[in-house]
């Protein structure tokens, strides 16, 4: 397989639902689908860009396998982790795009930095996005108190559950890595969680979070179209995915 123009990883199917709805999937005749899905994205000028996507699971338990599988498919020039996140810093509204400038465990520690070239390319396709440090947590931070504690210890701006792990695996594999996420819940919002009895008390209901996530999935697909247009434009921003 030739090099894909855009390679995305996400934790949950819902985060890539917009991509699956909008773009045509390529399923080679007689071949079994594997963990990586291939899509065809039309870009201005009549060109087509190939998009590879896969899921690493919440907390990235499948990240190592997905990256190993990616290297069997192609010679990846980049890997971009997309999805949702929770705000830790005030002023980050729901739906706000955030481009990672570093990844750190929720308990603090060394900061892992994304690839600068891929990060610039992400930002070029997402004007107005904020930059921030991503804290990687072991569980959903469902209360303001948990979010406040994470921000104090990690110094992060948003929280997610995969960034540090994917960054480490990508670095070990020699793949330039970066990440774009969209805010699902604000820093002062308490959340209801799937599978737990509703607690009331001003917590954001699961149904509201699902609706927000659906809009984020569409925002990710919108961004993919703009990013793919860059990949198909030889005079566009460098993407770190060409010789």
Image (cartoon, rainbow, N blue to C red):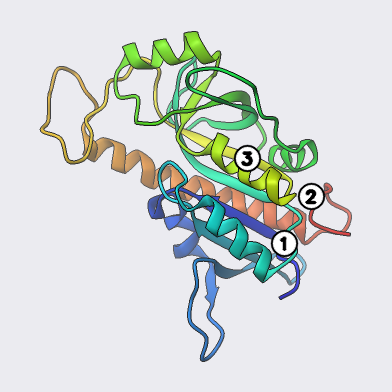
**Residue ID at (15%, 35%):** 196
Q: Earlier in the sequence, mark 1 or mark 3?
A: 1
Name the spot of residue 120 as percent of width and height, x first.
76, 37
Q: Residue furthest front?
A: 172
Tags 1 and 3 in contact by the CB under 8 Å rule? no
Q: Residues within 10 Å of mark 3 (few under 14, many from 20)?
A: some
Name the spot of residue 78 as percent of width and height, x first.
72, 51
| Front in this rendered view, residue 47 or 77 | 77
> What kind of element bears circle 3?
helix
* Mark 2 to mark 1 CA distance (whole Å): 9 Å
Name the spot of residue 38 as percent of width and height, x first.
58, 70
* Relative height, residue 70 to residue 193 (above, below): below
Residue at label 3? 168
Residue at label 1? 5
- Residue 198, image quadrant: top left
**Residue ID at (49%, 66%):** 35
| Front in this rendered view, residue 72 or 55 | 72
Tags 2 and 1 in contact by the CB under 8 Å rule? yes
Give the total number of marks visible in the rendering.
3
Q: Quadrant of the N terminus?
A: bottom right
Residue 239 - label? 2
Q: Earlier in the sequence, mark 2 or mark 1?
A: 1
**Residue ID at (50%, 24%):** 158
Q: Is residue 200 visible?
A: yes
């Amino acid at each position: 397989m030739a090099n894909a123009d855009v390679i995305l990883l996400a934790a949950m199917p819902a985060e890539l639902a917009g991509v699956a709805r909008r773009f045509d999937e390529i399923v080679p005749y007689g071949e079994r689908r594997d963990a990586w899905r291939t899509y065809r994205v039309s870009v201005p000028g009549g060109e087509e860009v190939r998009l590879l996507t896969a899921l690493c699971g919440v907390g990235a338990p499948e990240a190592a396998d997905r990256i190993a599988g990616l290297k069997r498919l192609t010679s990846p020039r980049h890997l971009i982790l997309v999805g949702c996140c929770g705000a830790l810093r005030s002023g980050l509204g729901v739906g706000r795009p955030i481009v990672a400038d570093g990844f750190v465990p929720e308990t603090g520690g060394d900061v892992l930095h994304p690839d600068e070239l891929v990060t610039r390319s992400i930002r070029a396709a997402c004007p107005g996005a904020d930059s921030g440090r991503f804290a990687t947590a072991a569980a959903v931070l469902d209360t303001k108190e948990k979010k406040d504690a994470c921000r104090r210890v990690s110094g992060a701006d948003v929280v997610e559950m995969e960034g540090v792990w994917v960054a480490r695996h990508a670095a070990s594999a020699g793949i330039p890595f970066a990440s774009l996420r969209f805010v699902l819940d604000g820093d002062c919002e308490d959340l209801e969680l799937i599978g737990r009895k509703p607690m009331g008390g001003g917590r954001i209901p699961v149904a509201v979070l699902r609706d927000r996530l659906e809009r984020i999935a569409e925002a990710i697909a919108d961004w993919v179209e703009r990013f793919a247009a860059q990949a198909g434009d030889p005079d566009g921003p460098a993407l770190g995915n060409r010789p």
